[in-house]
Image (cartoon, helix red, strand yellow):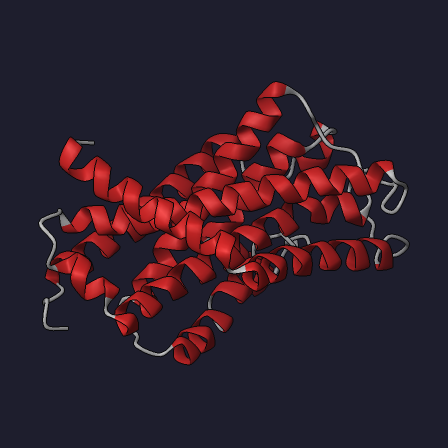
Amino acid sequence: MTNGMLLPVWSLTLRELVRFVRQRSRAIGAFLQPVIFWVLFGTGFSESFRMQGVEGGPSYAEFFLPGIAAMIVMFAAIFSAISVIQDRNEGFLQGVLVAPVPRTAIVFGKLCGGTLLAVLQGLLFLGLAAALHLAGLVPDVRWNLSFGSVVGTIAFLGLMGFALCGLGYMFAWRLDSIQGFHAIMSVLLFPMWLLSGAFFEAPQSGWLKWVIAANPLTYGVAGLKRVMASDAAAVAHLPSMALCVIVSVAFAVVCVGIDVAMTRKQRVSN
């Protein structure tokens, strides 16, 4: 990345971080809701959940843990995209568009800021999950804590965050209404998460199996499960690690490519 790109990207990334720190309600809501979901669902489904084909398999809290980390990434992507609409309505975006910086820097600045926040929130949640486990609130949870697992977790959180921030940016760039953006995201991102294997296992047959297989987020969640799993047999049925990486990277590249193309075509008067 050239010097002409680096400074604006860093400036916009830092602005996203500062904005997040100052908006305490956003930080609390984006973090506590997934924690509550994990504790309640993990405890409530613990007696009824059984993974097919895996004797003595993981509890539901353990199965759901990577899915909740993906949910946090999804929320971070939504809030990051909302800031695009806010910046346009407040006039900040117009000022950035007329500045002597590459349009690509605008895209990467917004996406890097959202991705960094997503990864930090995801890691904070996993740390809290470990504390809740040690405190006995969610006892039946095991996960791989090796160095390679930690690096892989960060990598997949970053990949999913970058792709989902790019997807949110794609819609936010075309919209002027935060309410309209929420409506679109509620029928796009949340079903993507539900149909990614985060909340329930993909069925062995039927149309739902093919919908889940066609969902690019499925491979990010599957990759996260693979690097976090303490038992290889519990994740043997998931897509291979190579396929997870290829699809996740391709998803991010496509979203960012569309974002860059849209931003370059944006007229200053808009």
x, y (%) of residue 93? 23, 63
Of residue 99 and residue 120, the one placed in the foreground of this image is 99
Residue drawn at (12%, 54%) of the image: 99
Position of residue 136 relative to residue 99, above or below, is: above
x, y (%) of residue 132? 81, 43
Position of residue 61 relative to residue 169, above or below, is: above
Residue drawn at (72%, 59%) of the image: 37
Q: Quadrant of residue 194?
A: bottom right
x, y (%) of residue 133? 83, 39
Of residue 232 and residue 205, the one placed in the foreground of this image is 232
**Left or right of 240, for residue 125:** right
**Left or right of 175, for residue 228:** right
**Left or right of 182, for residue 46:** right
Of residue 171 and residue 2, the one placed in the foreground of this image is 2
Position of residue 32 relative to residue 122, above or below, is: below
Residue 269: in sight, yes or no?
yes
Residue drawn at (71%, 49%) of the image: 64
Quarter of the rendering occupied by the C terminus: bottom left
x, y (%) of residue 149? 61, 26
Position of residue 151 relative to residue 84, above or below, is: above
Quarter of the rendering occupied by the N terminus: top left
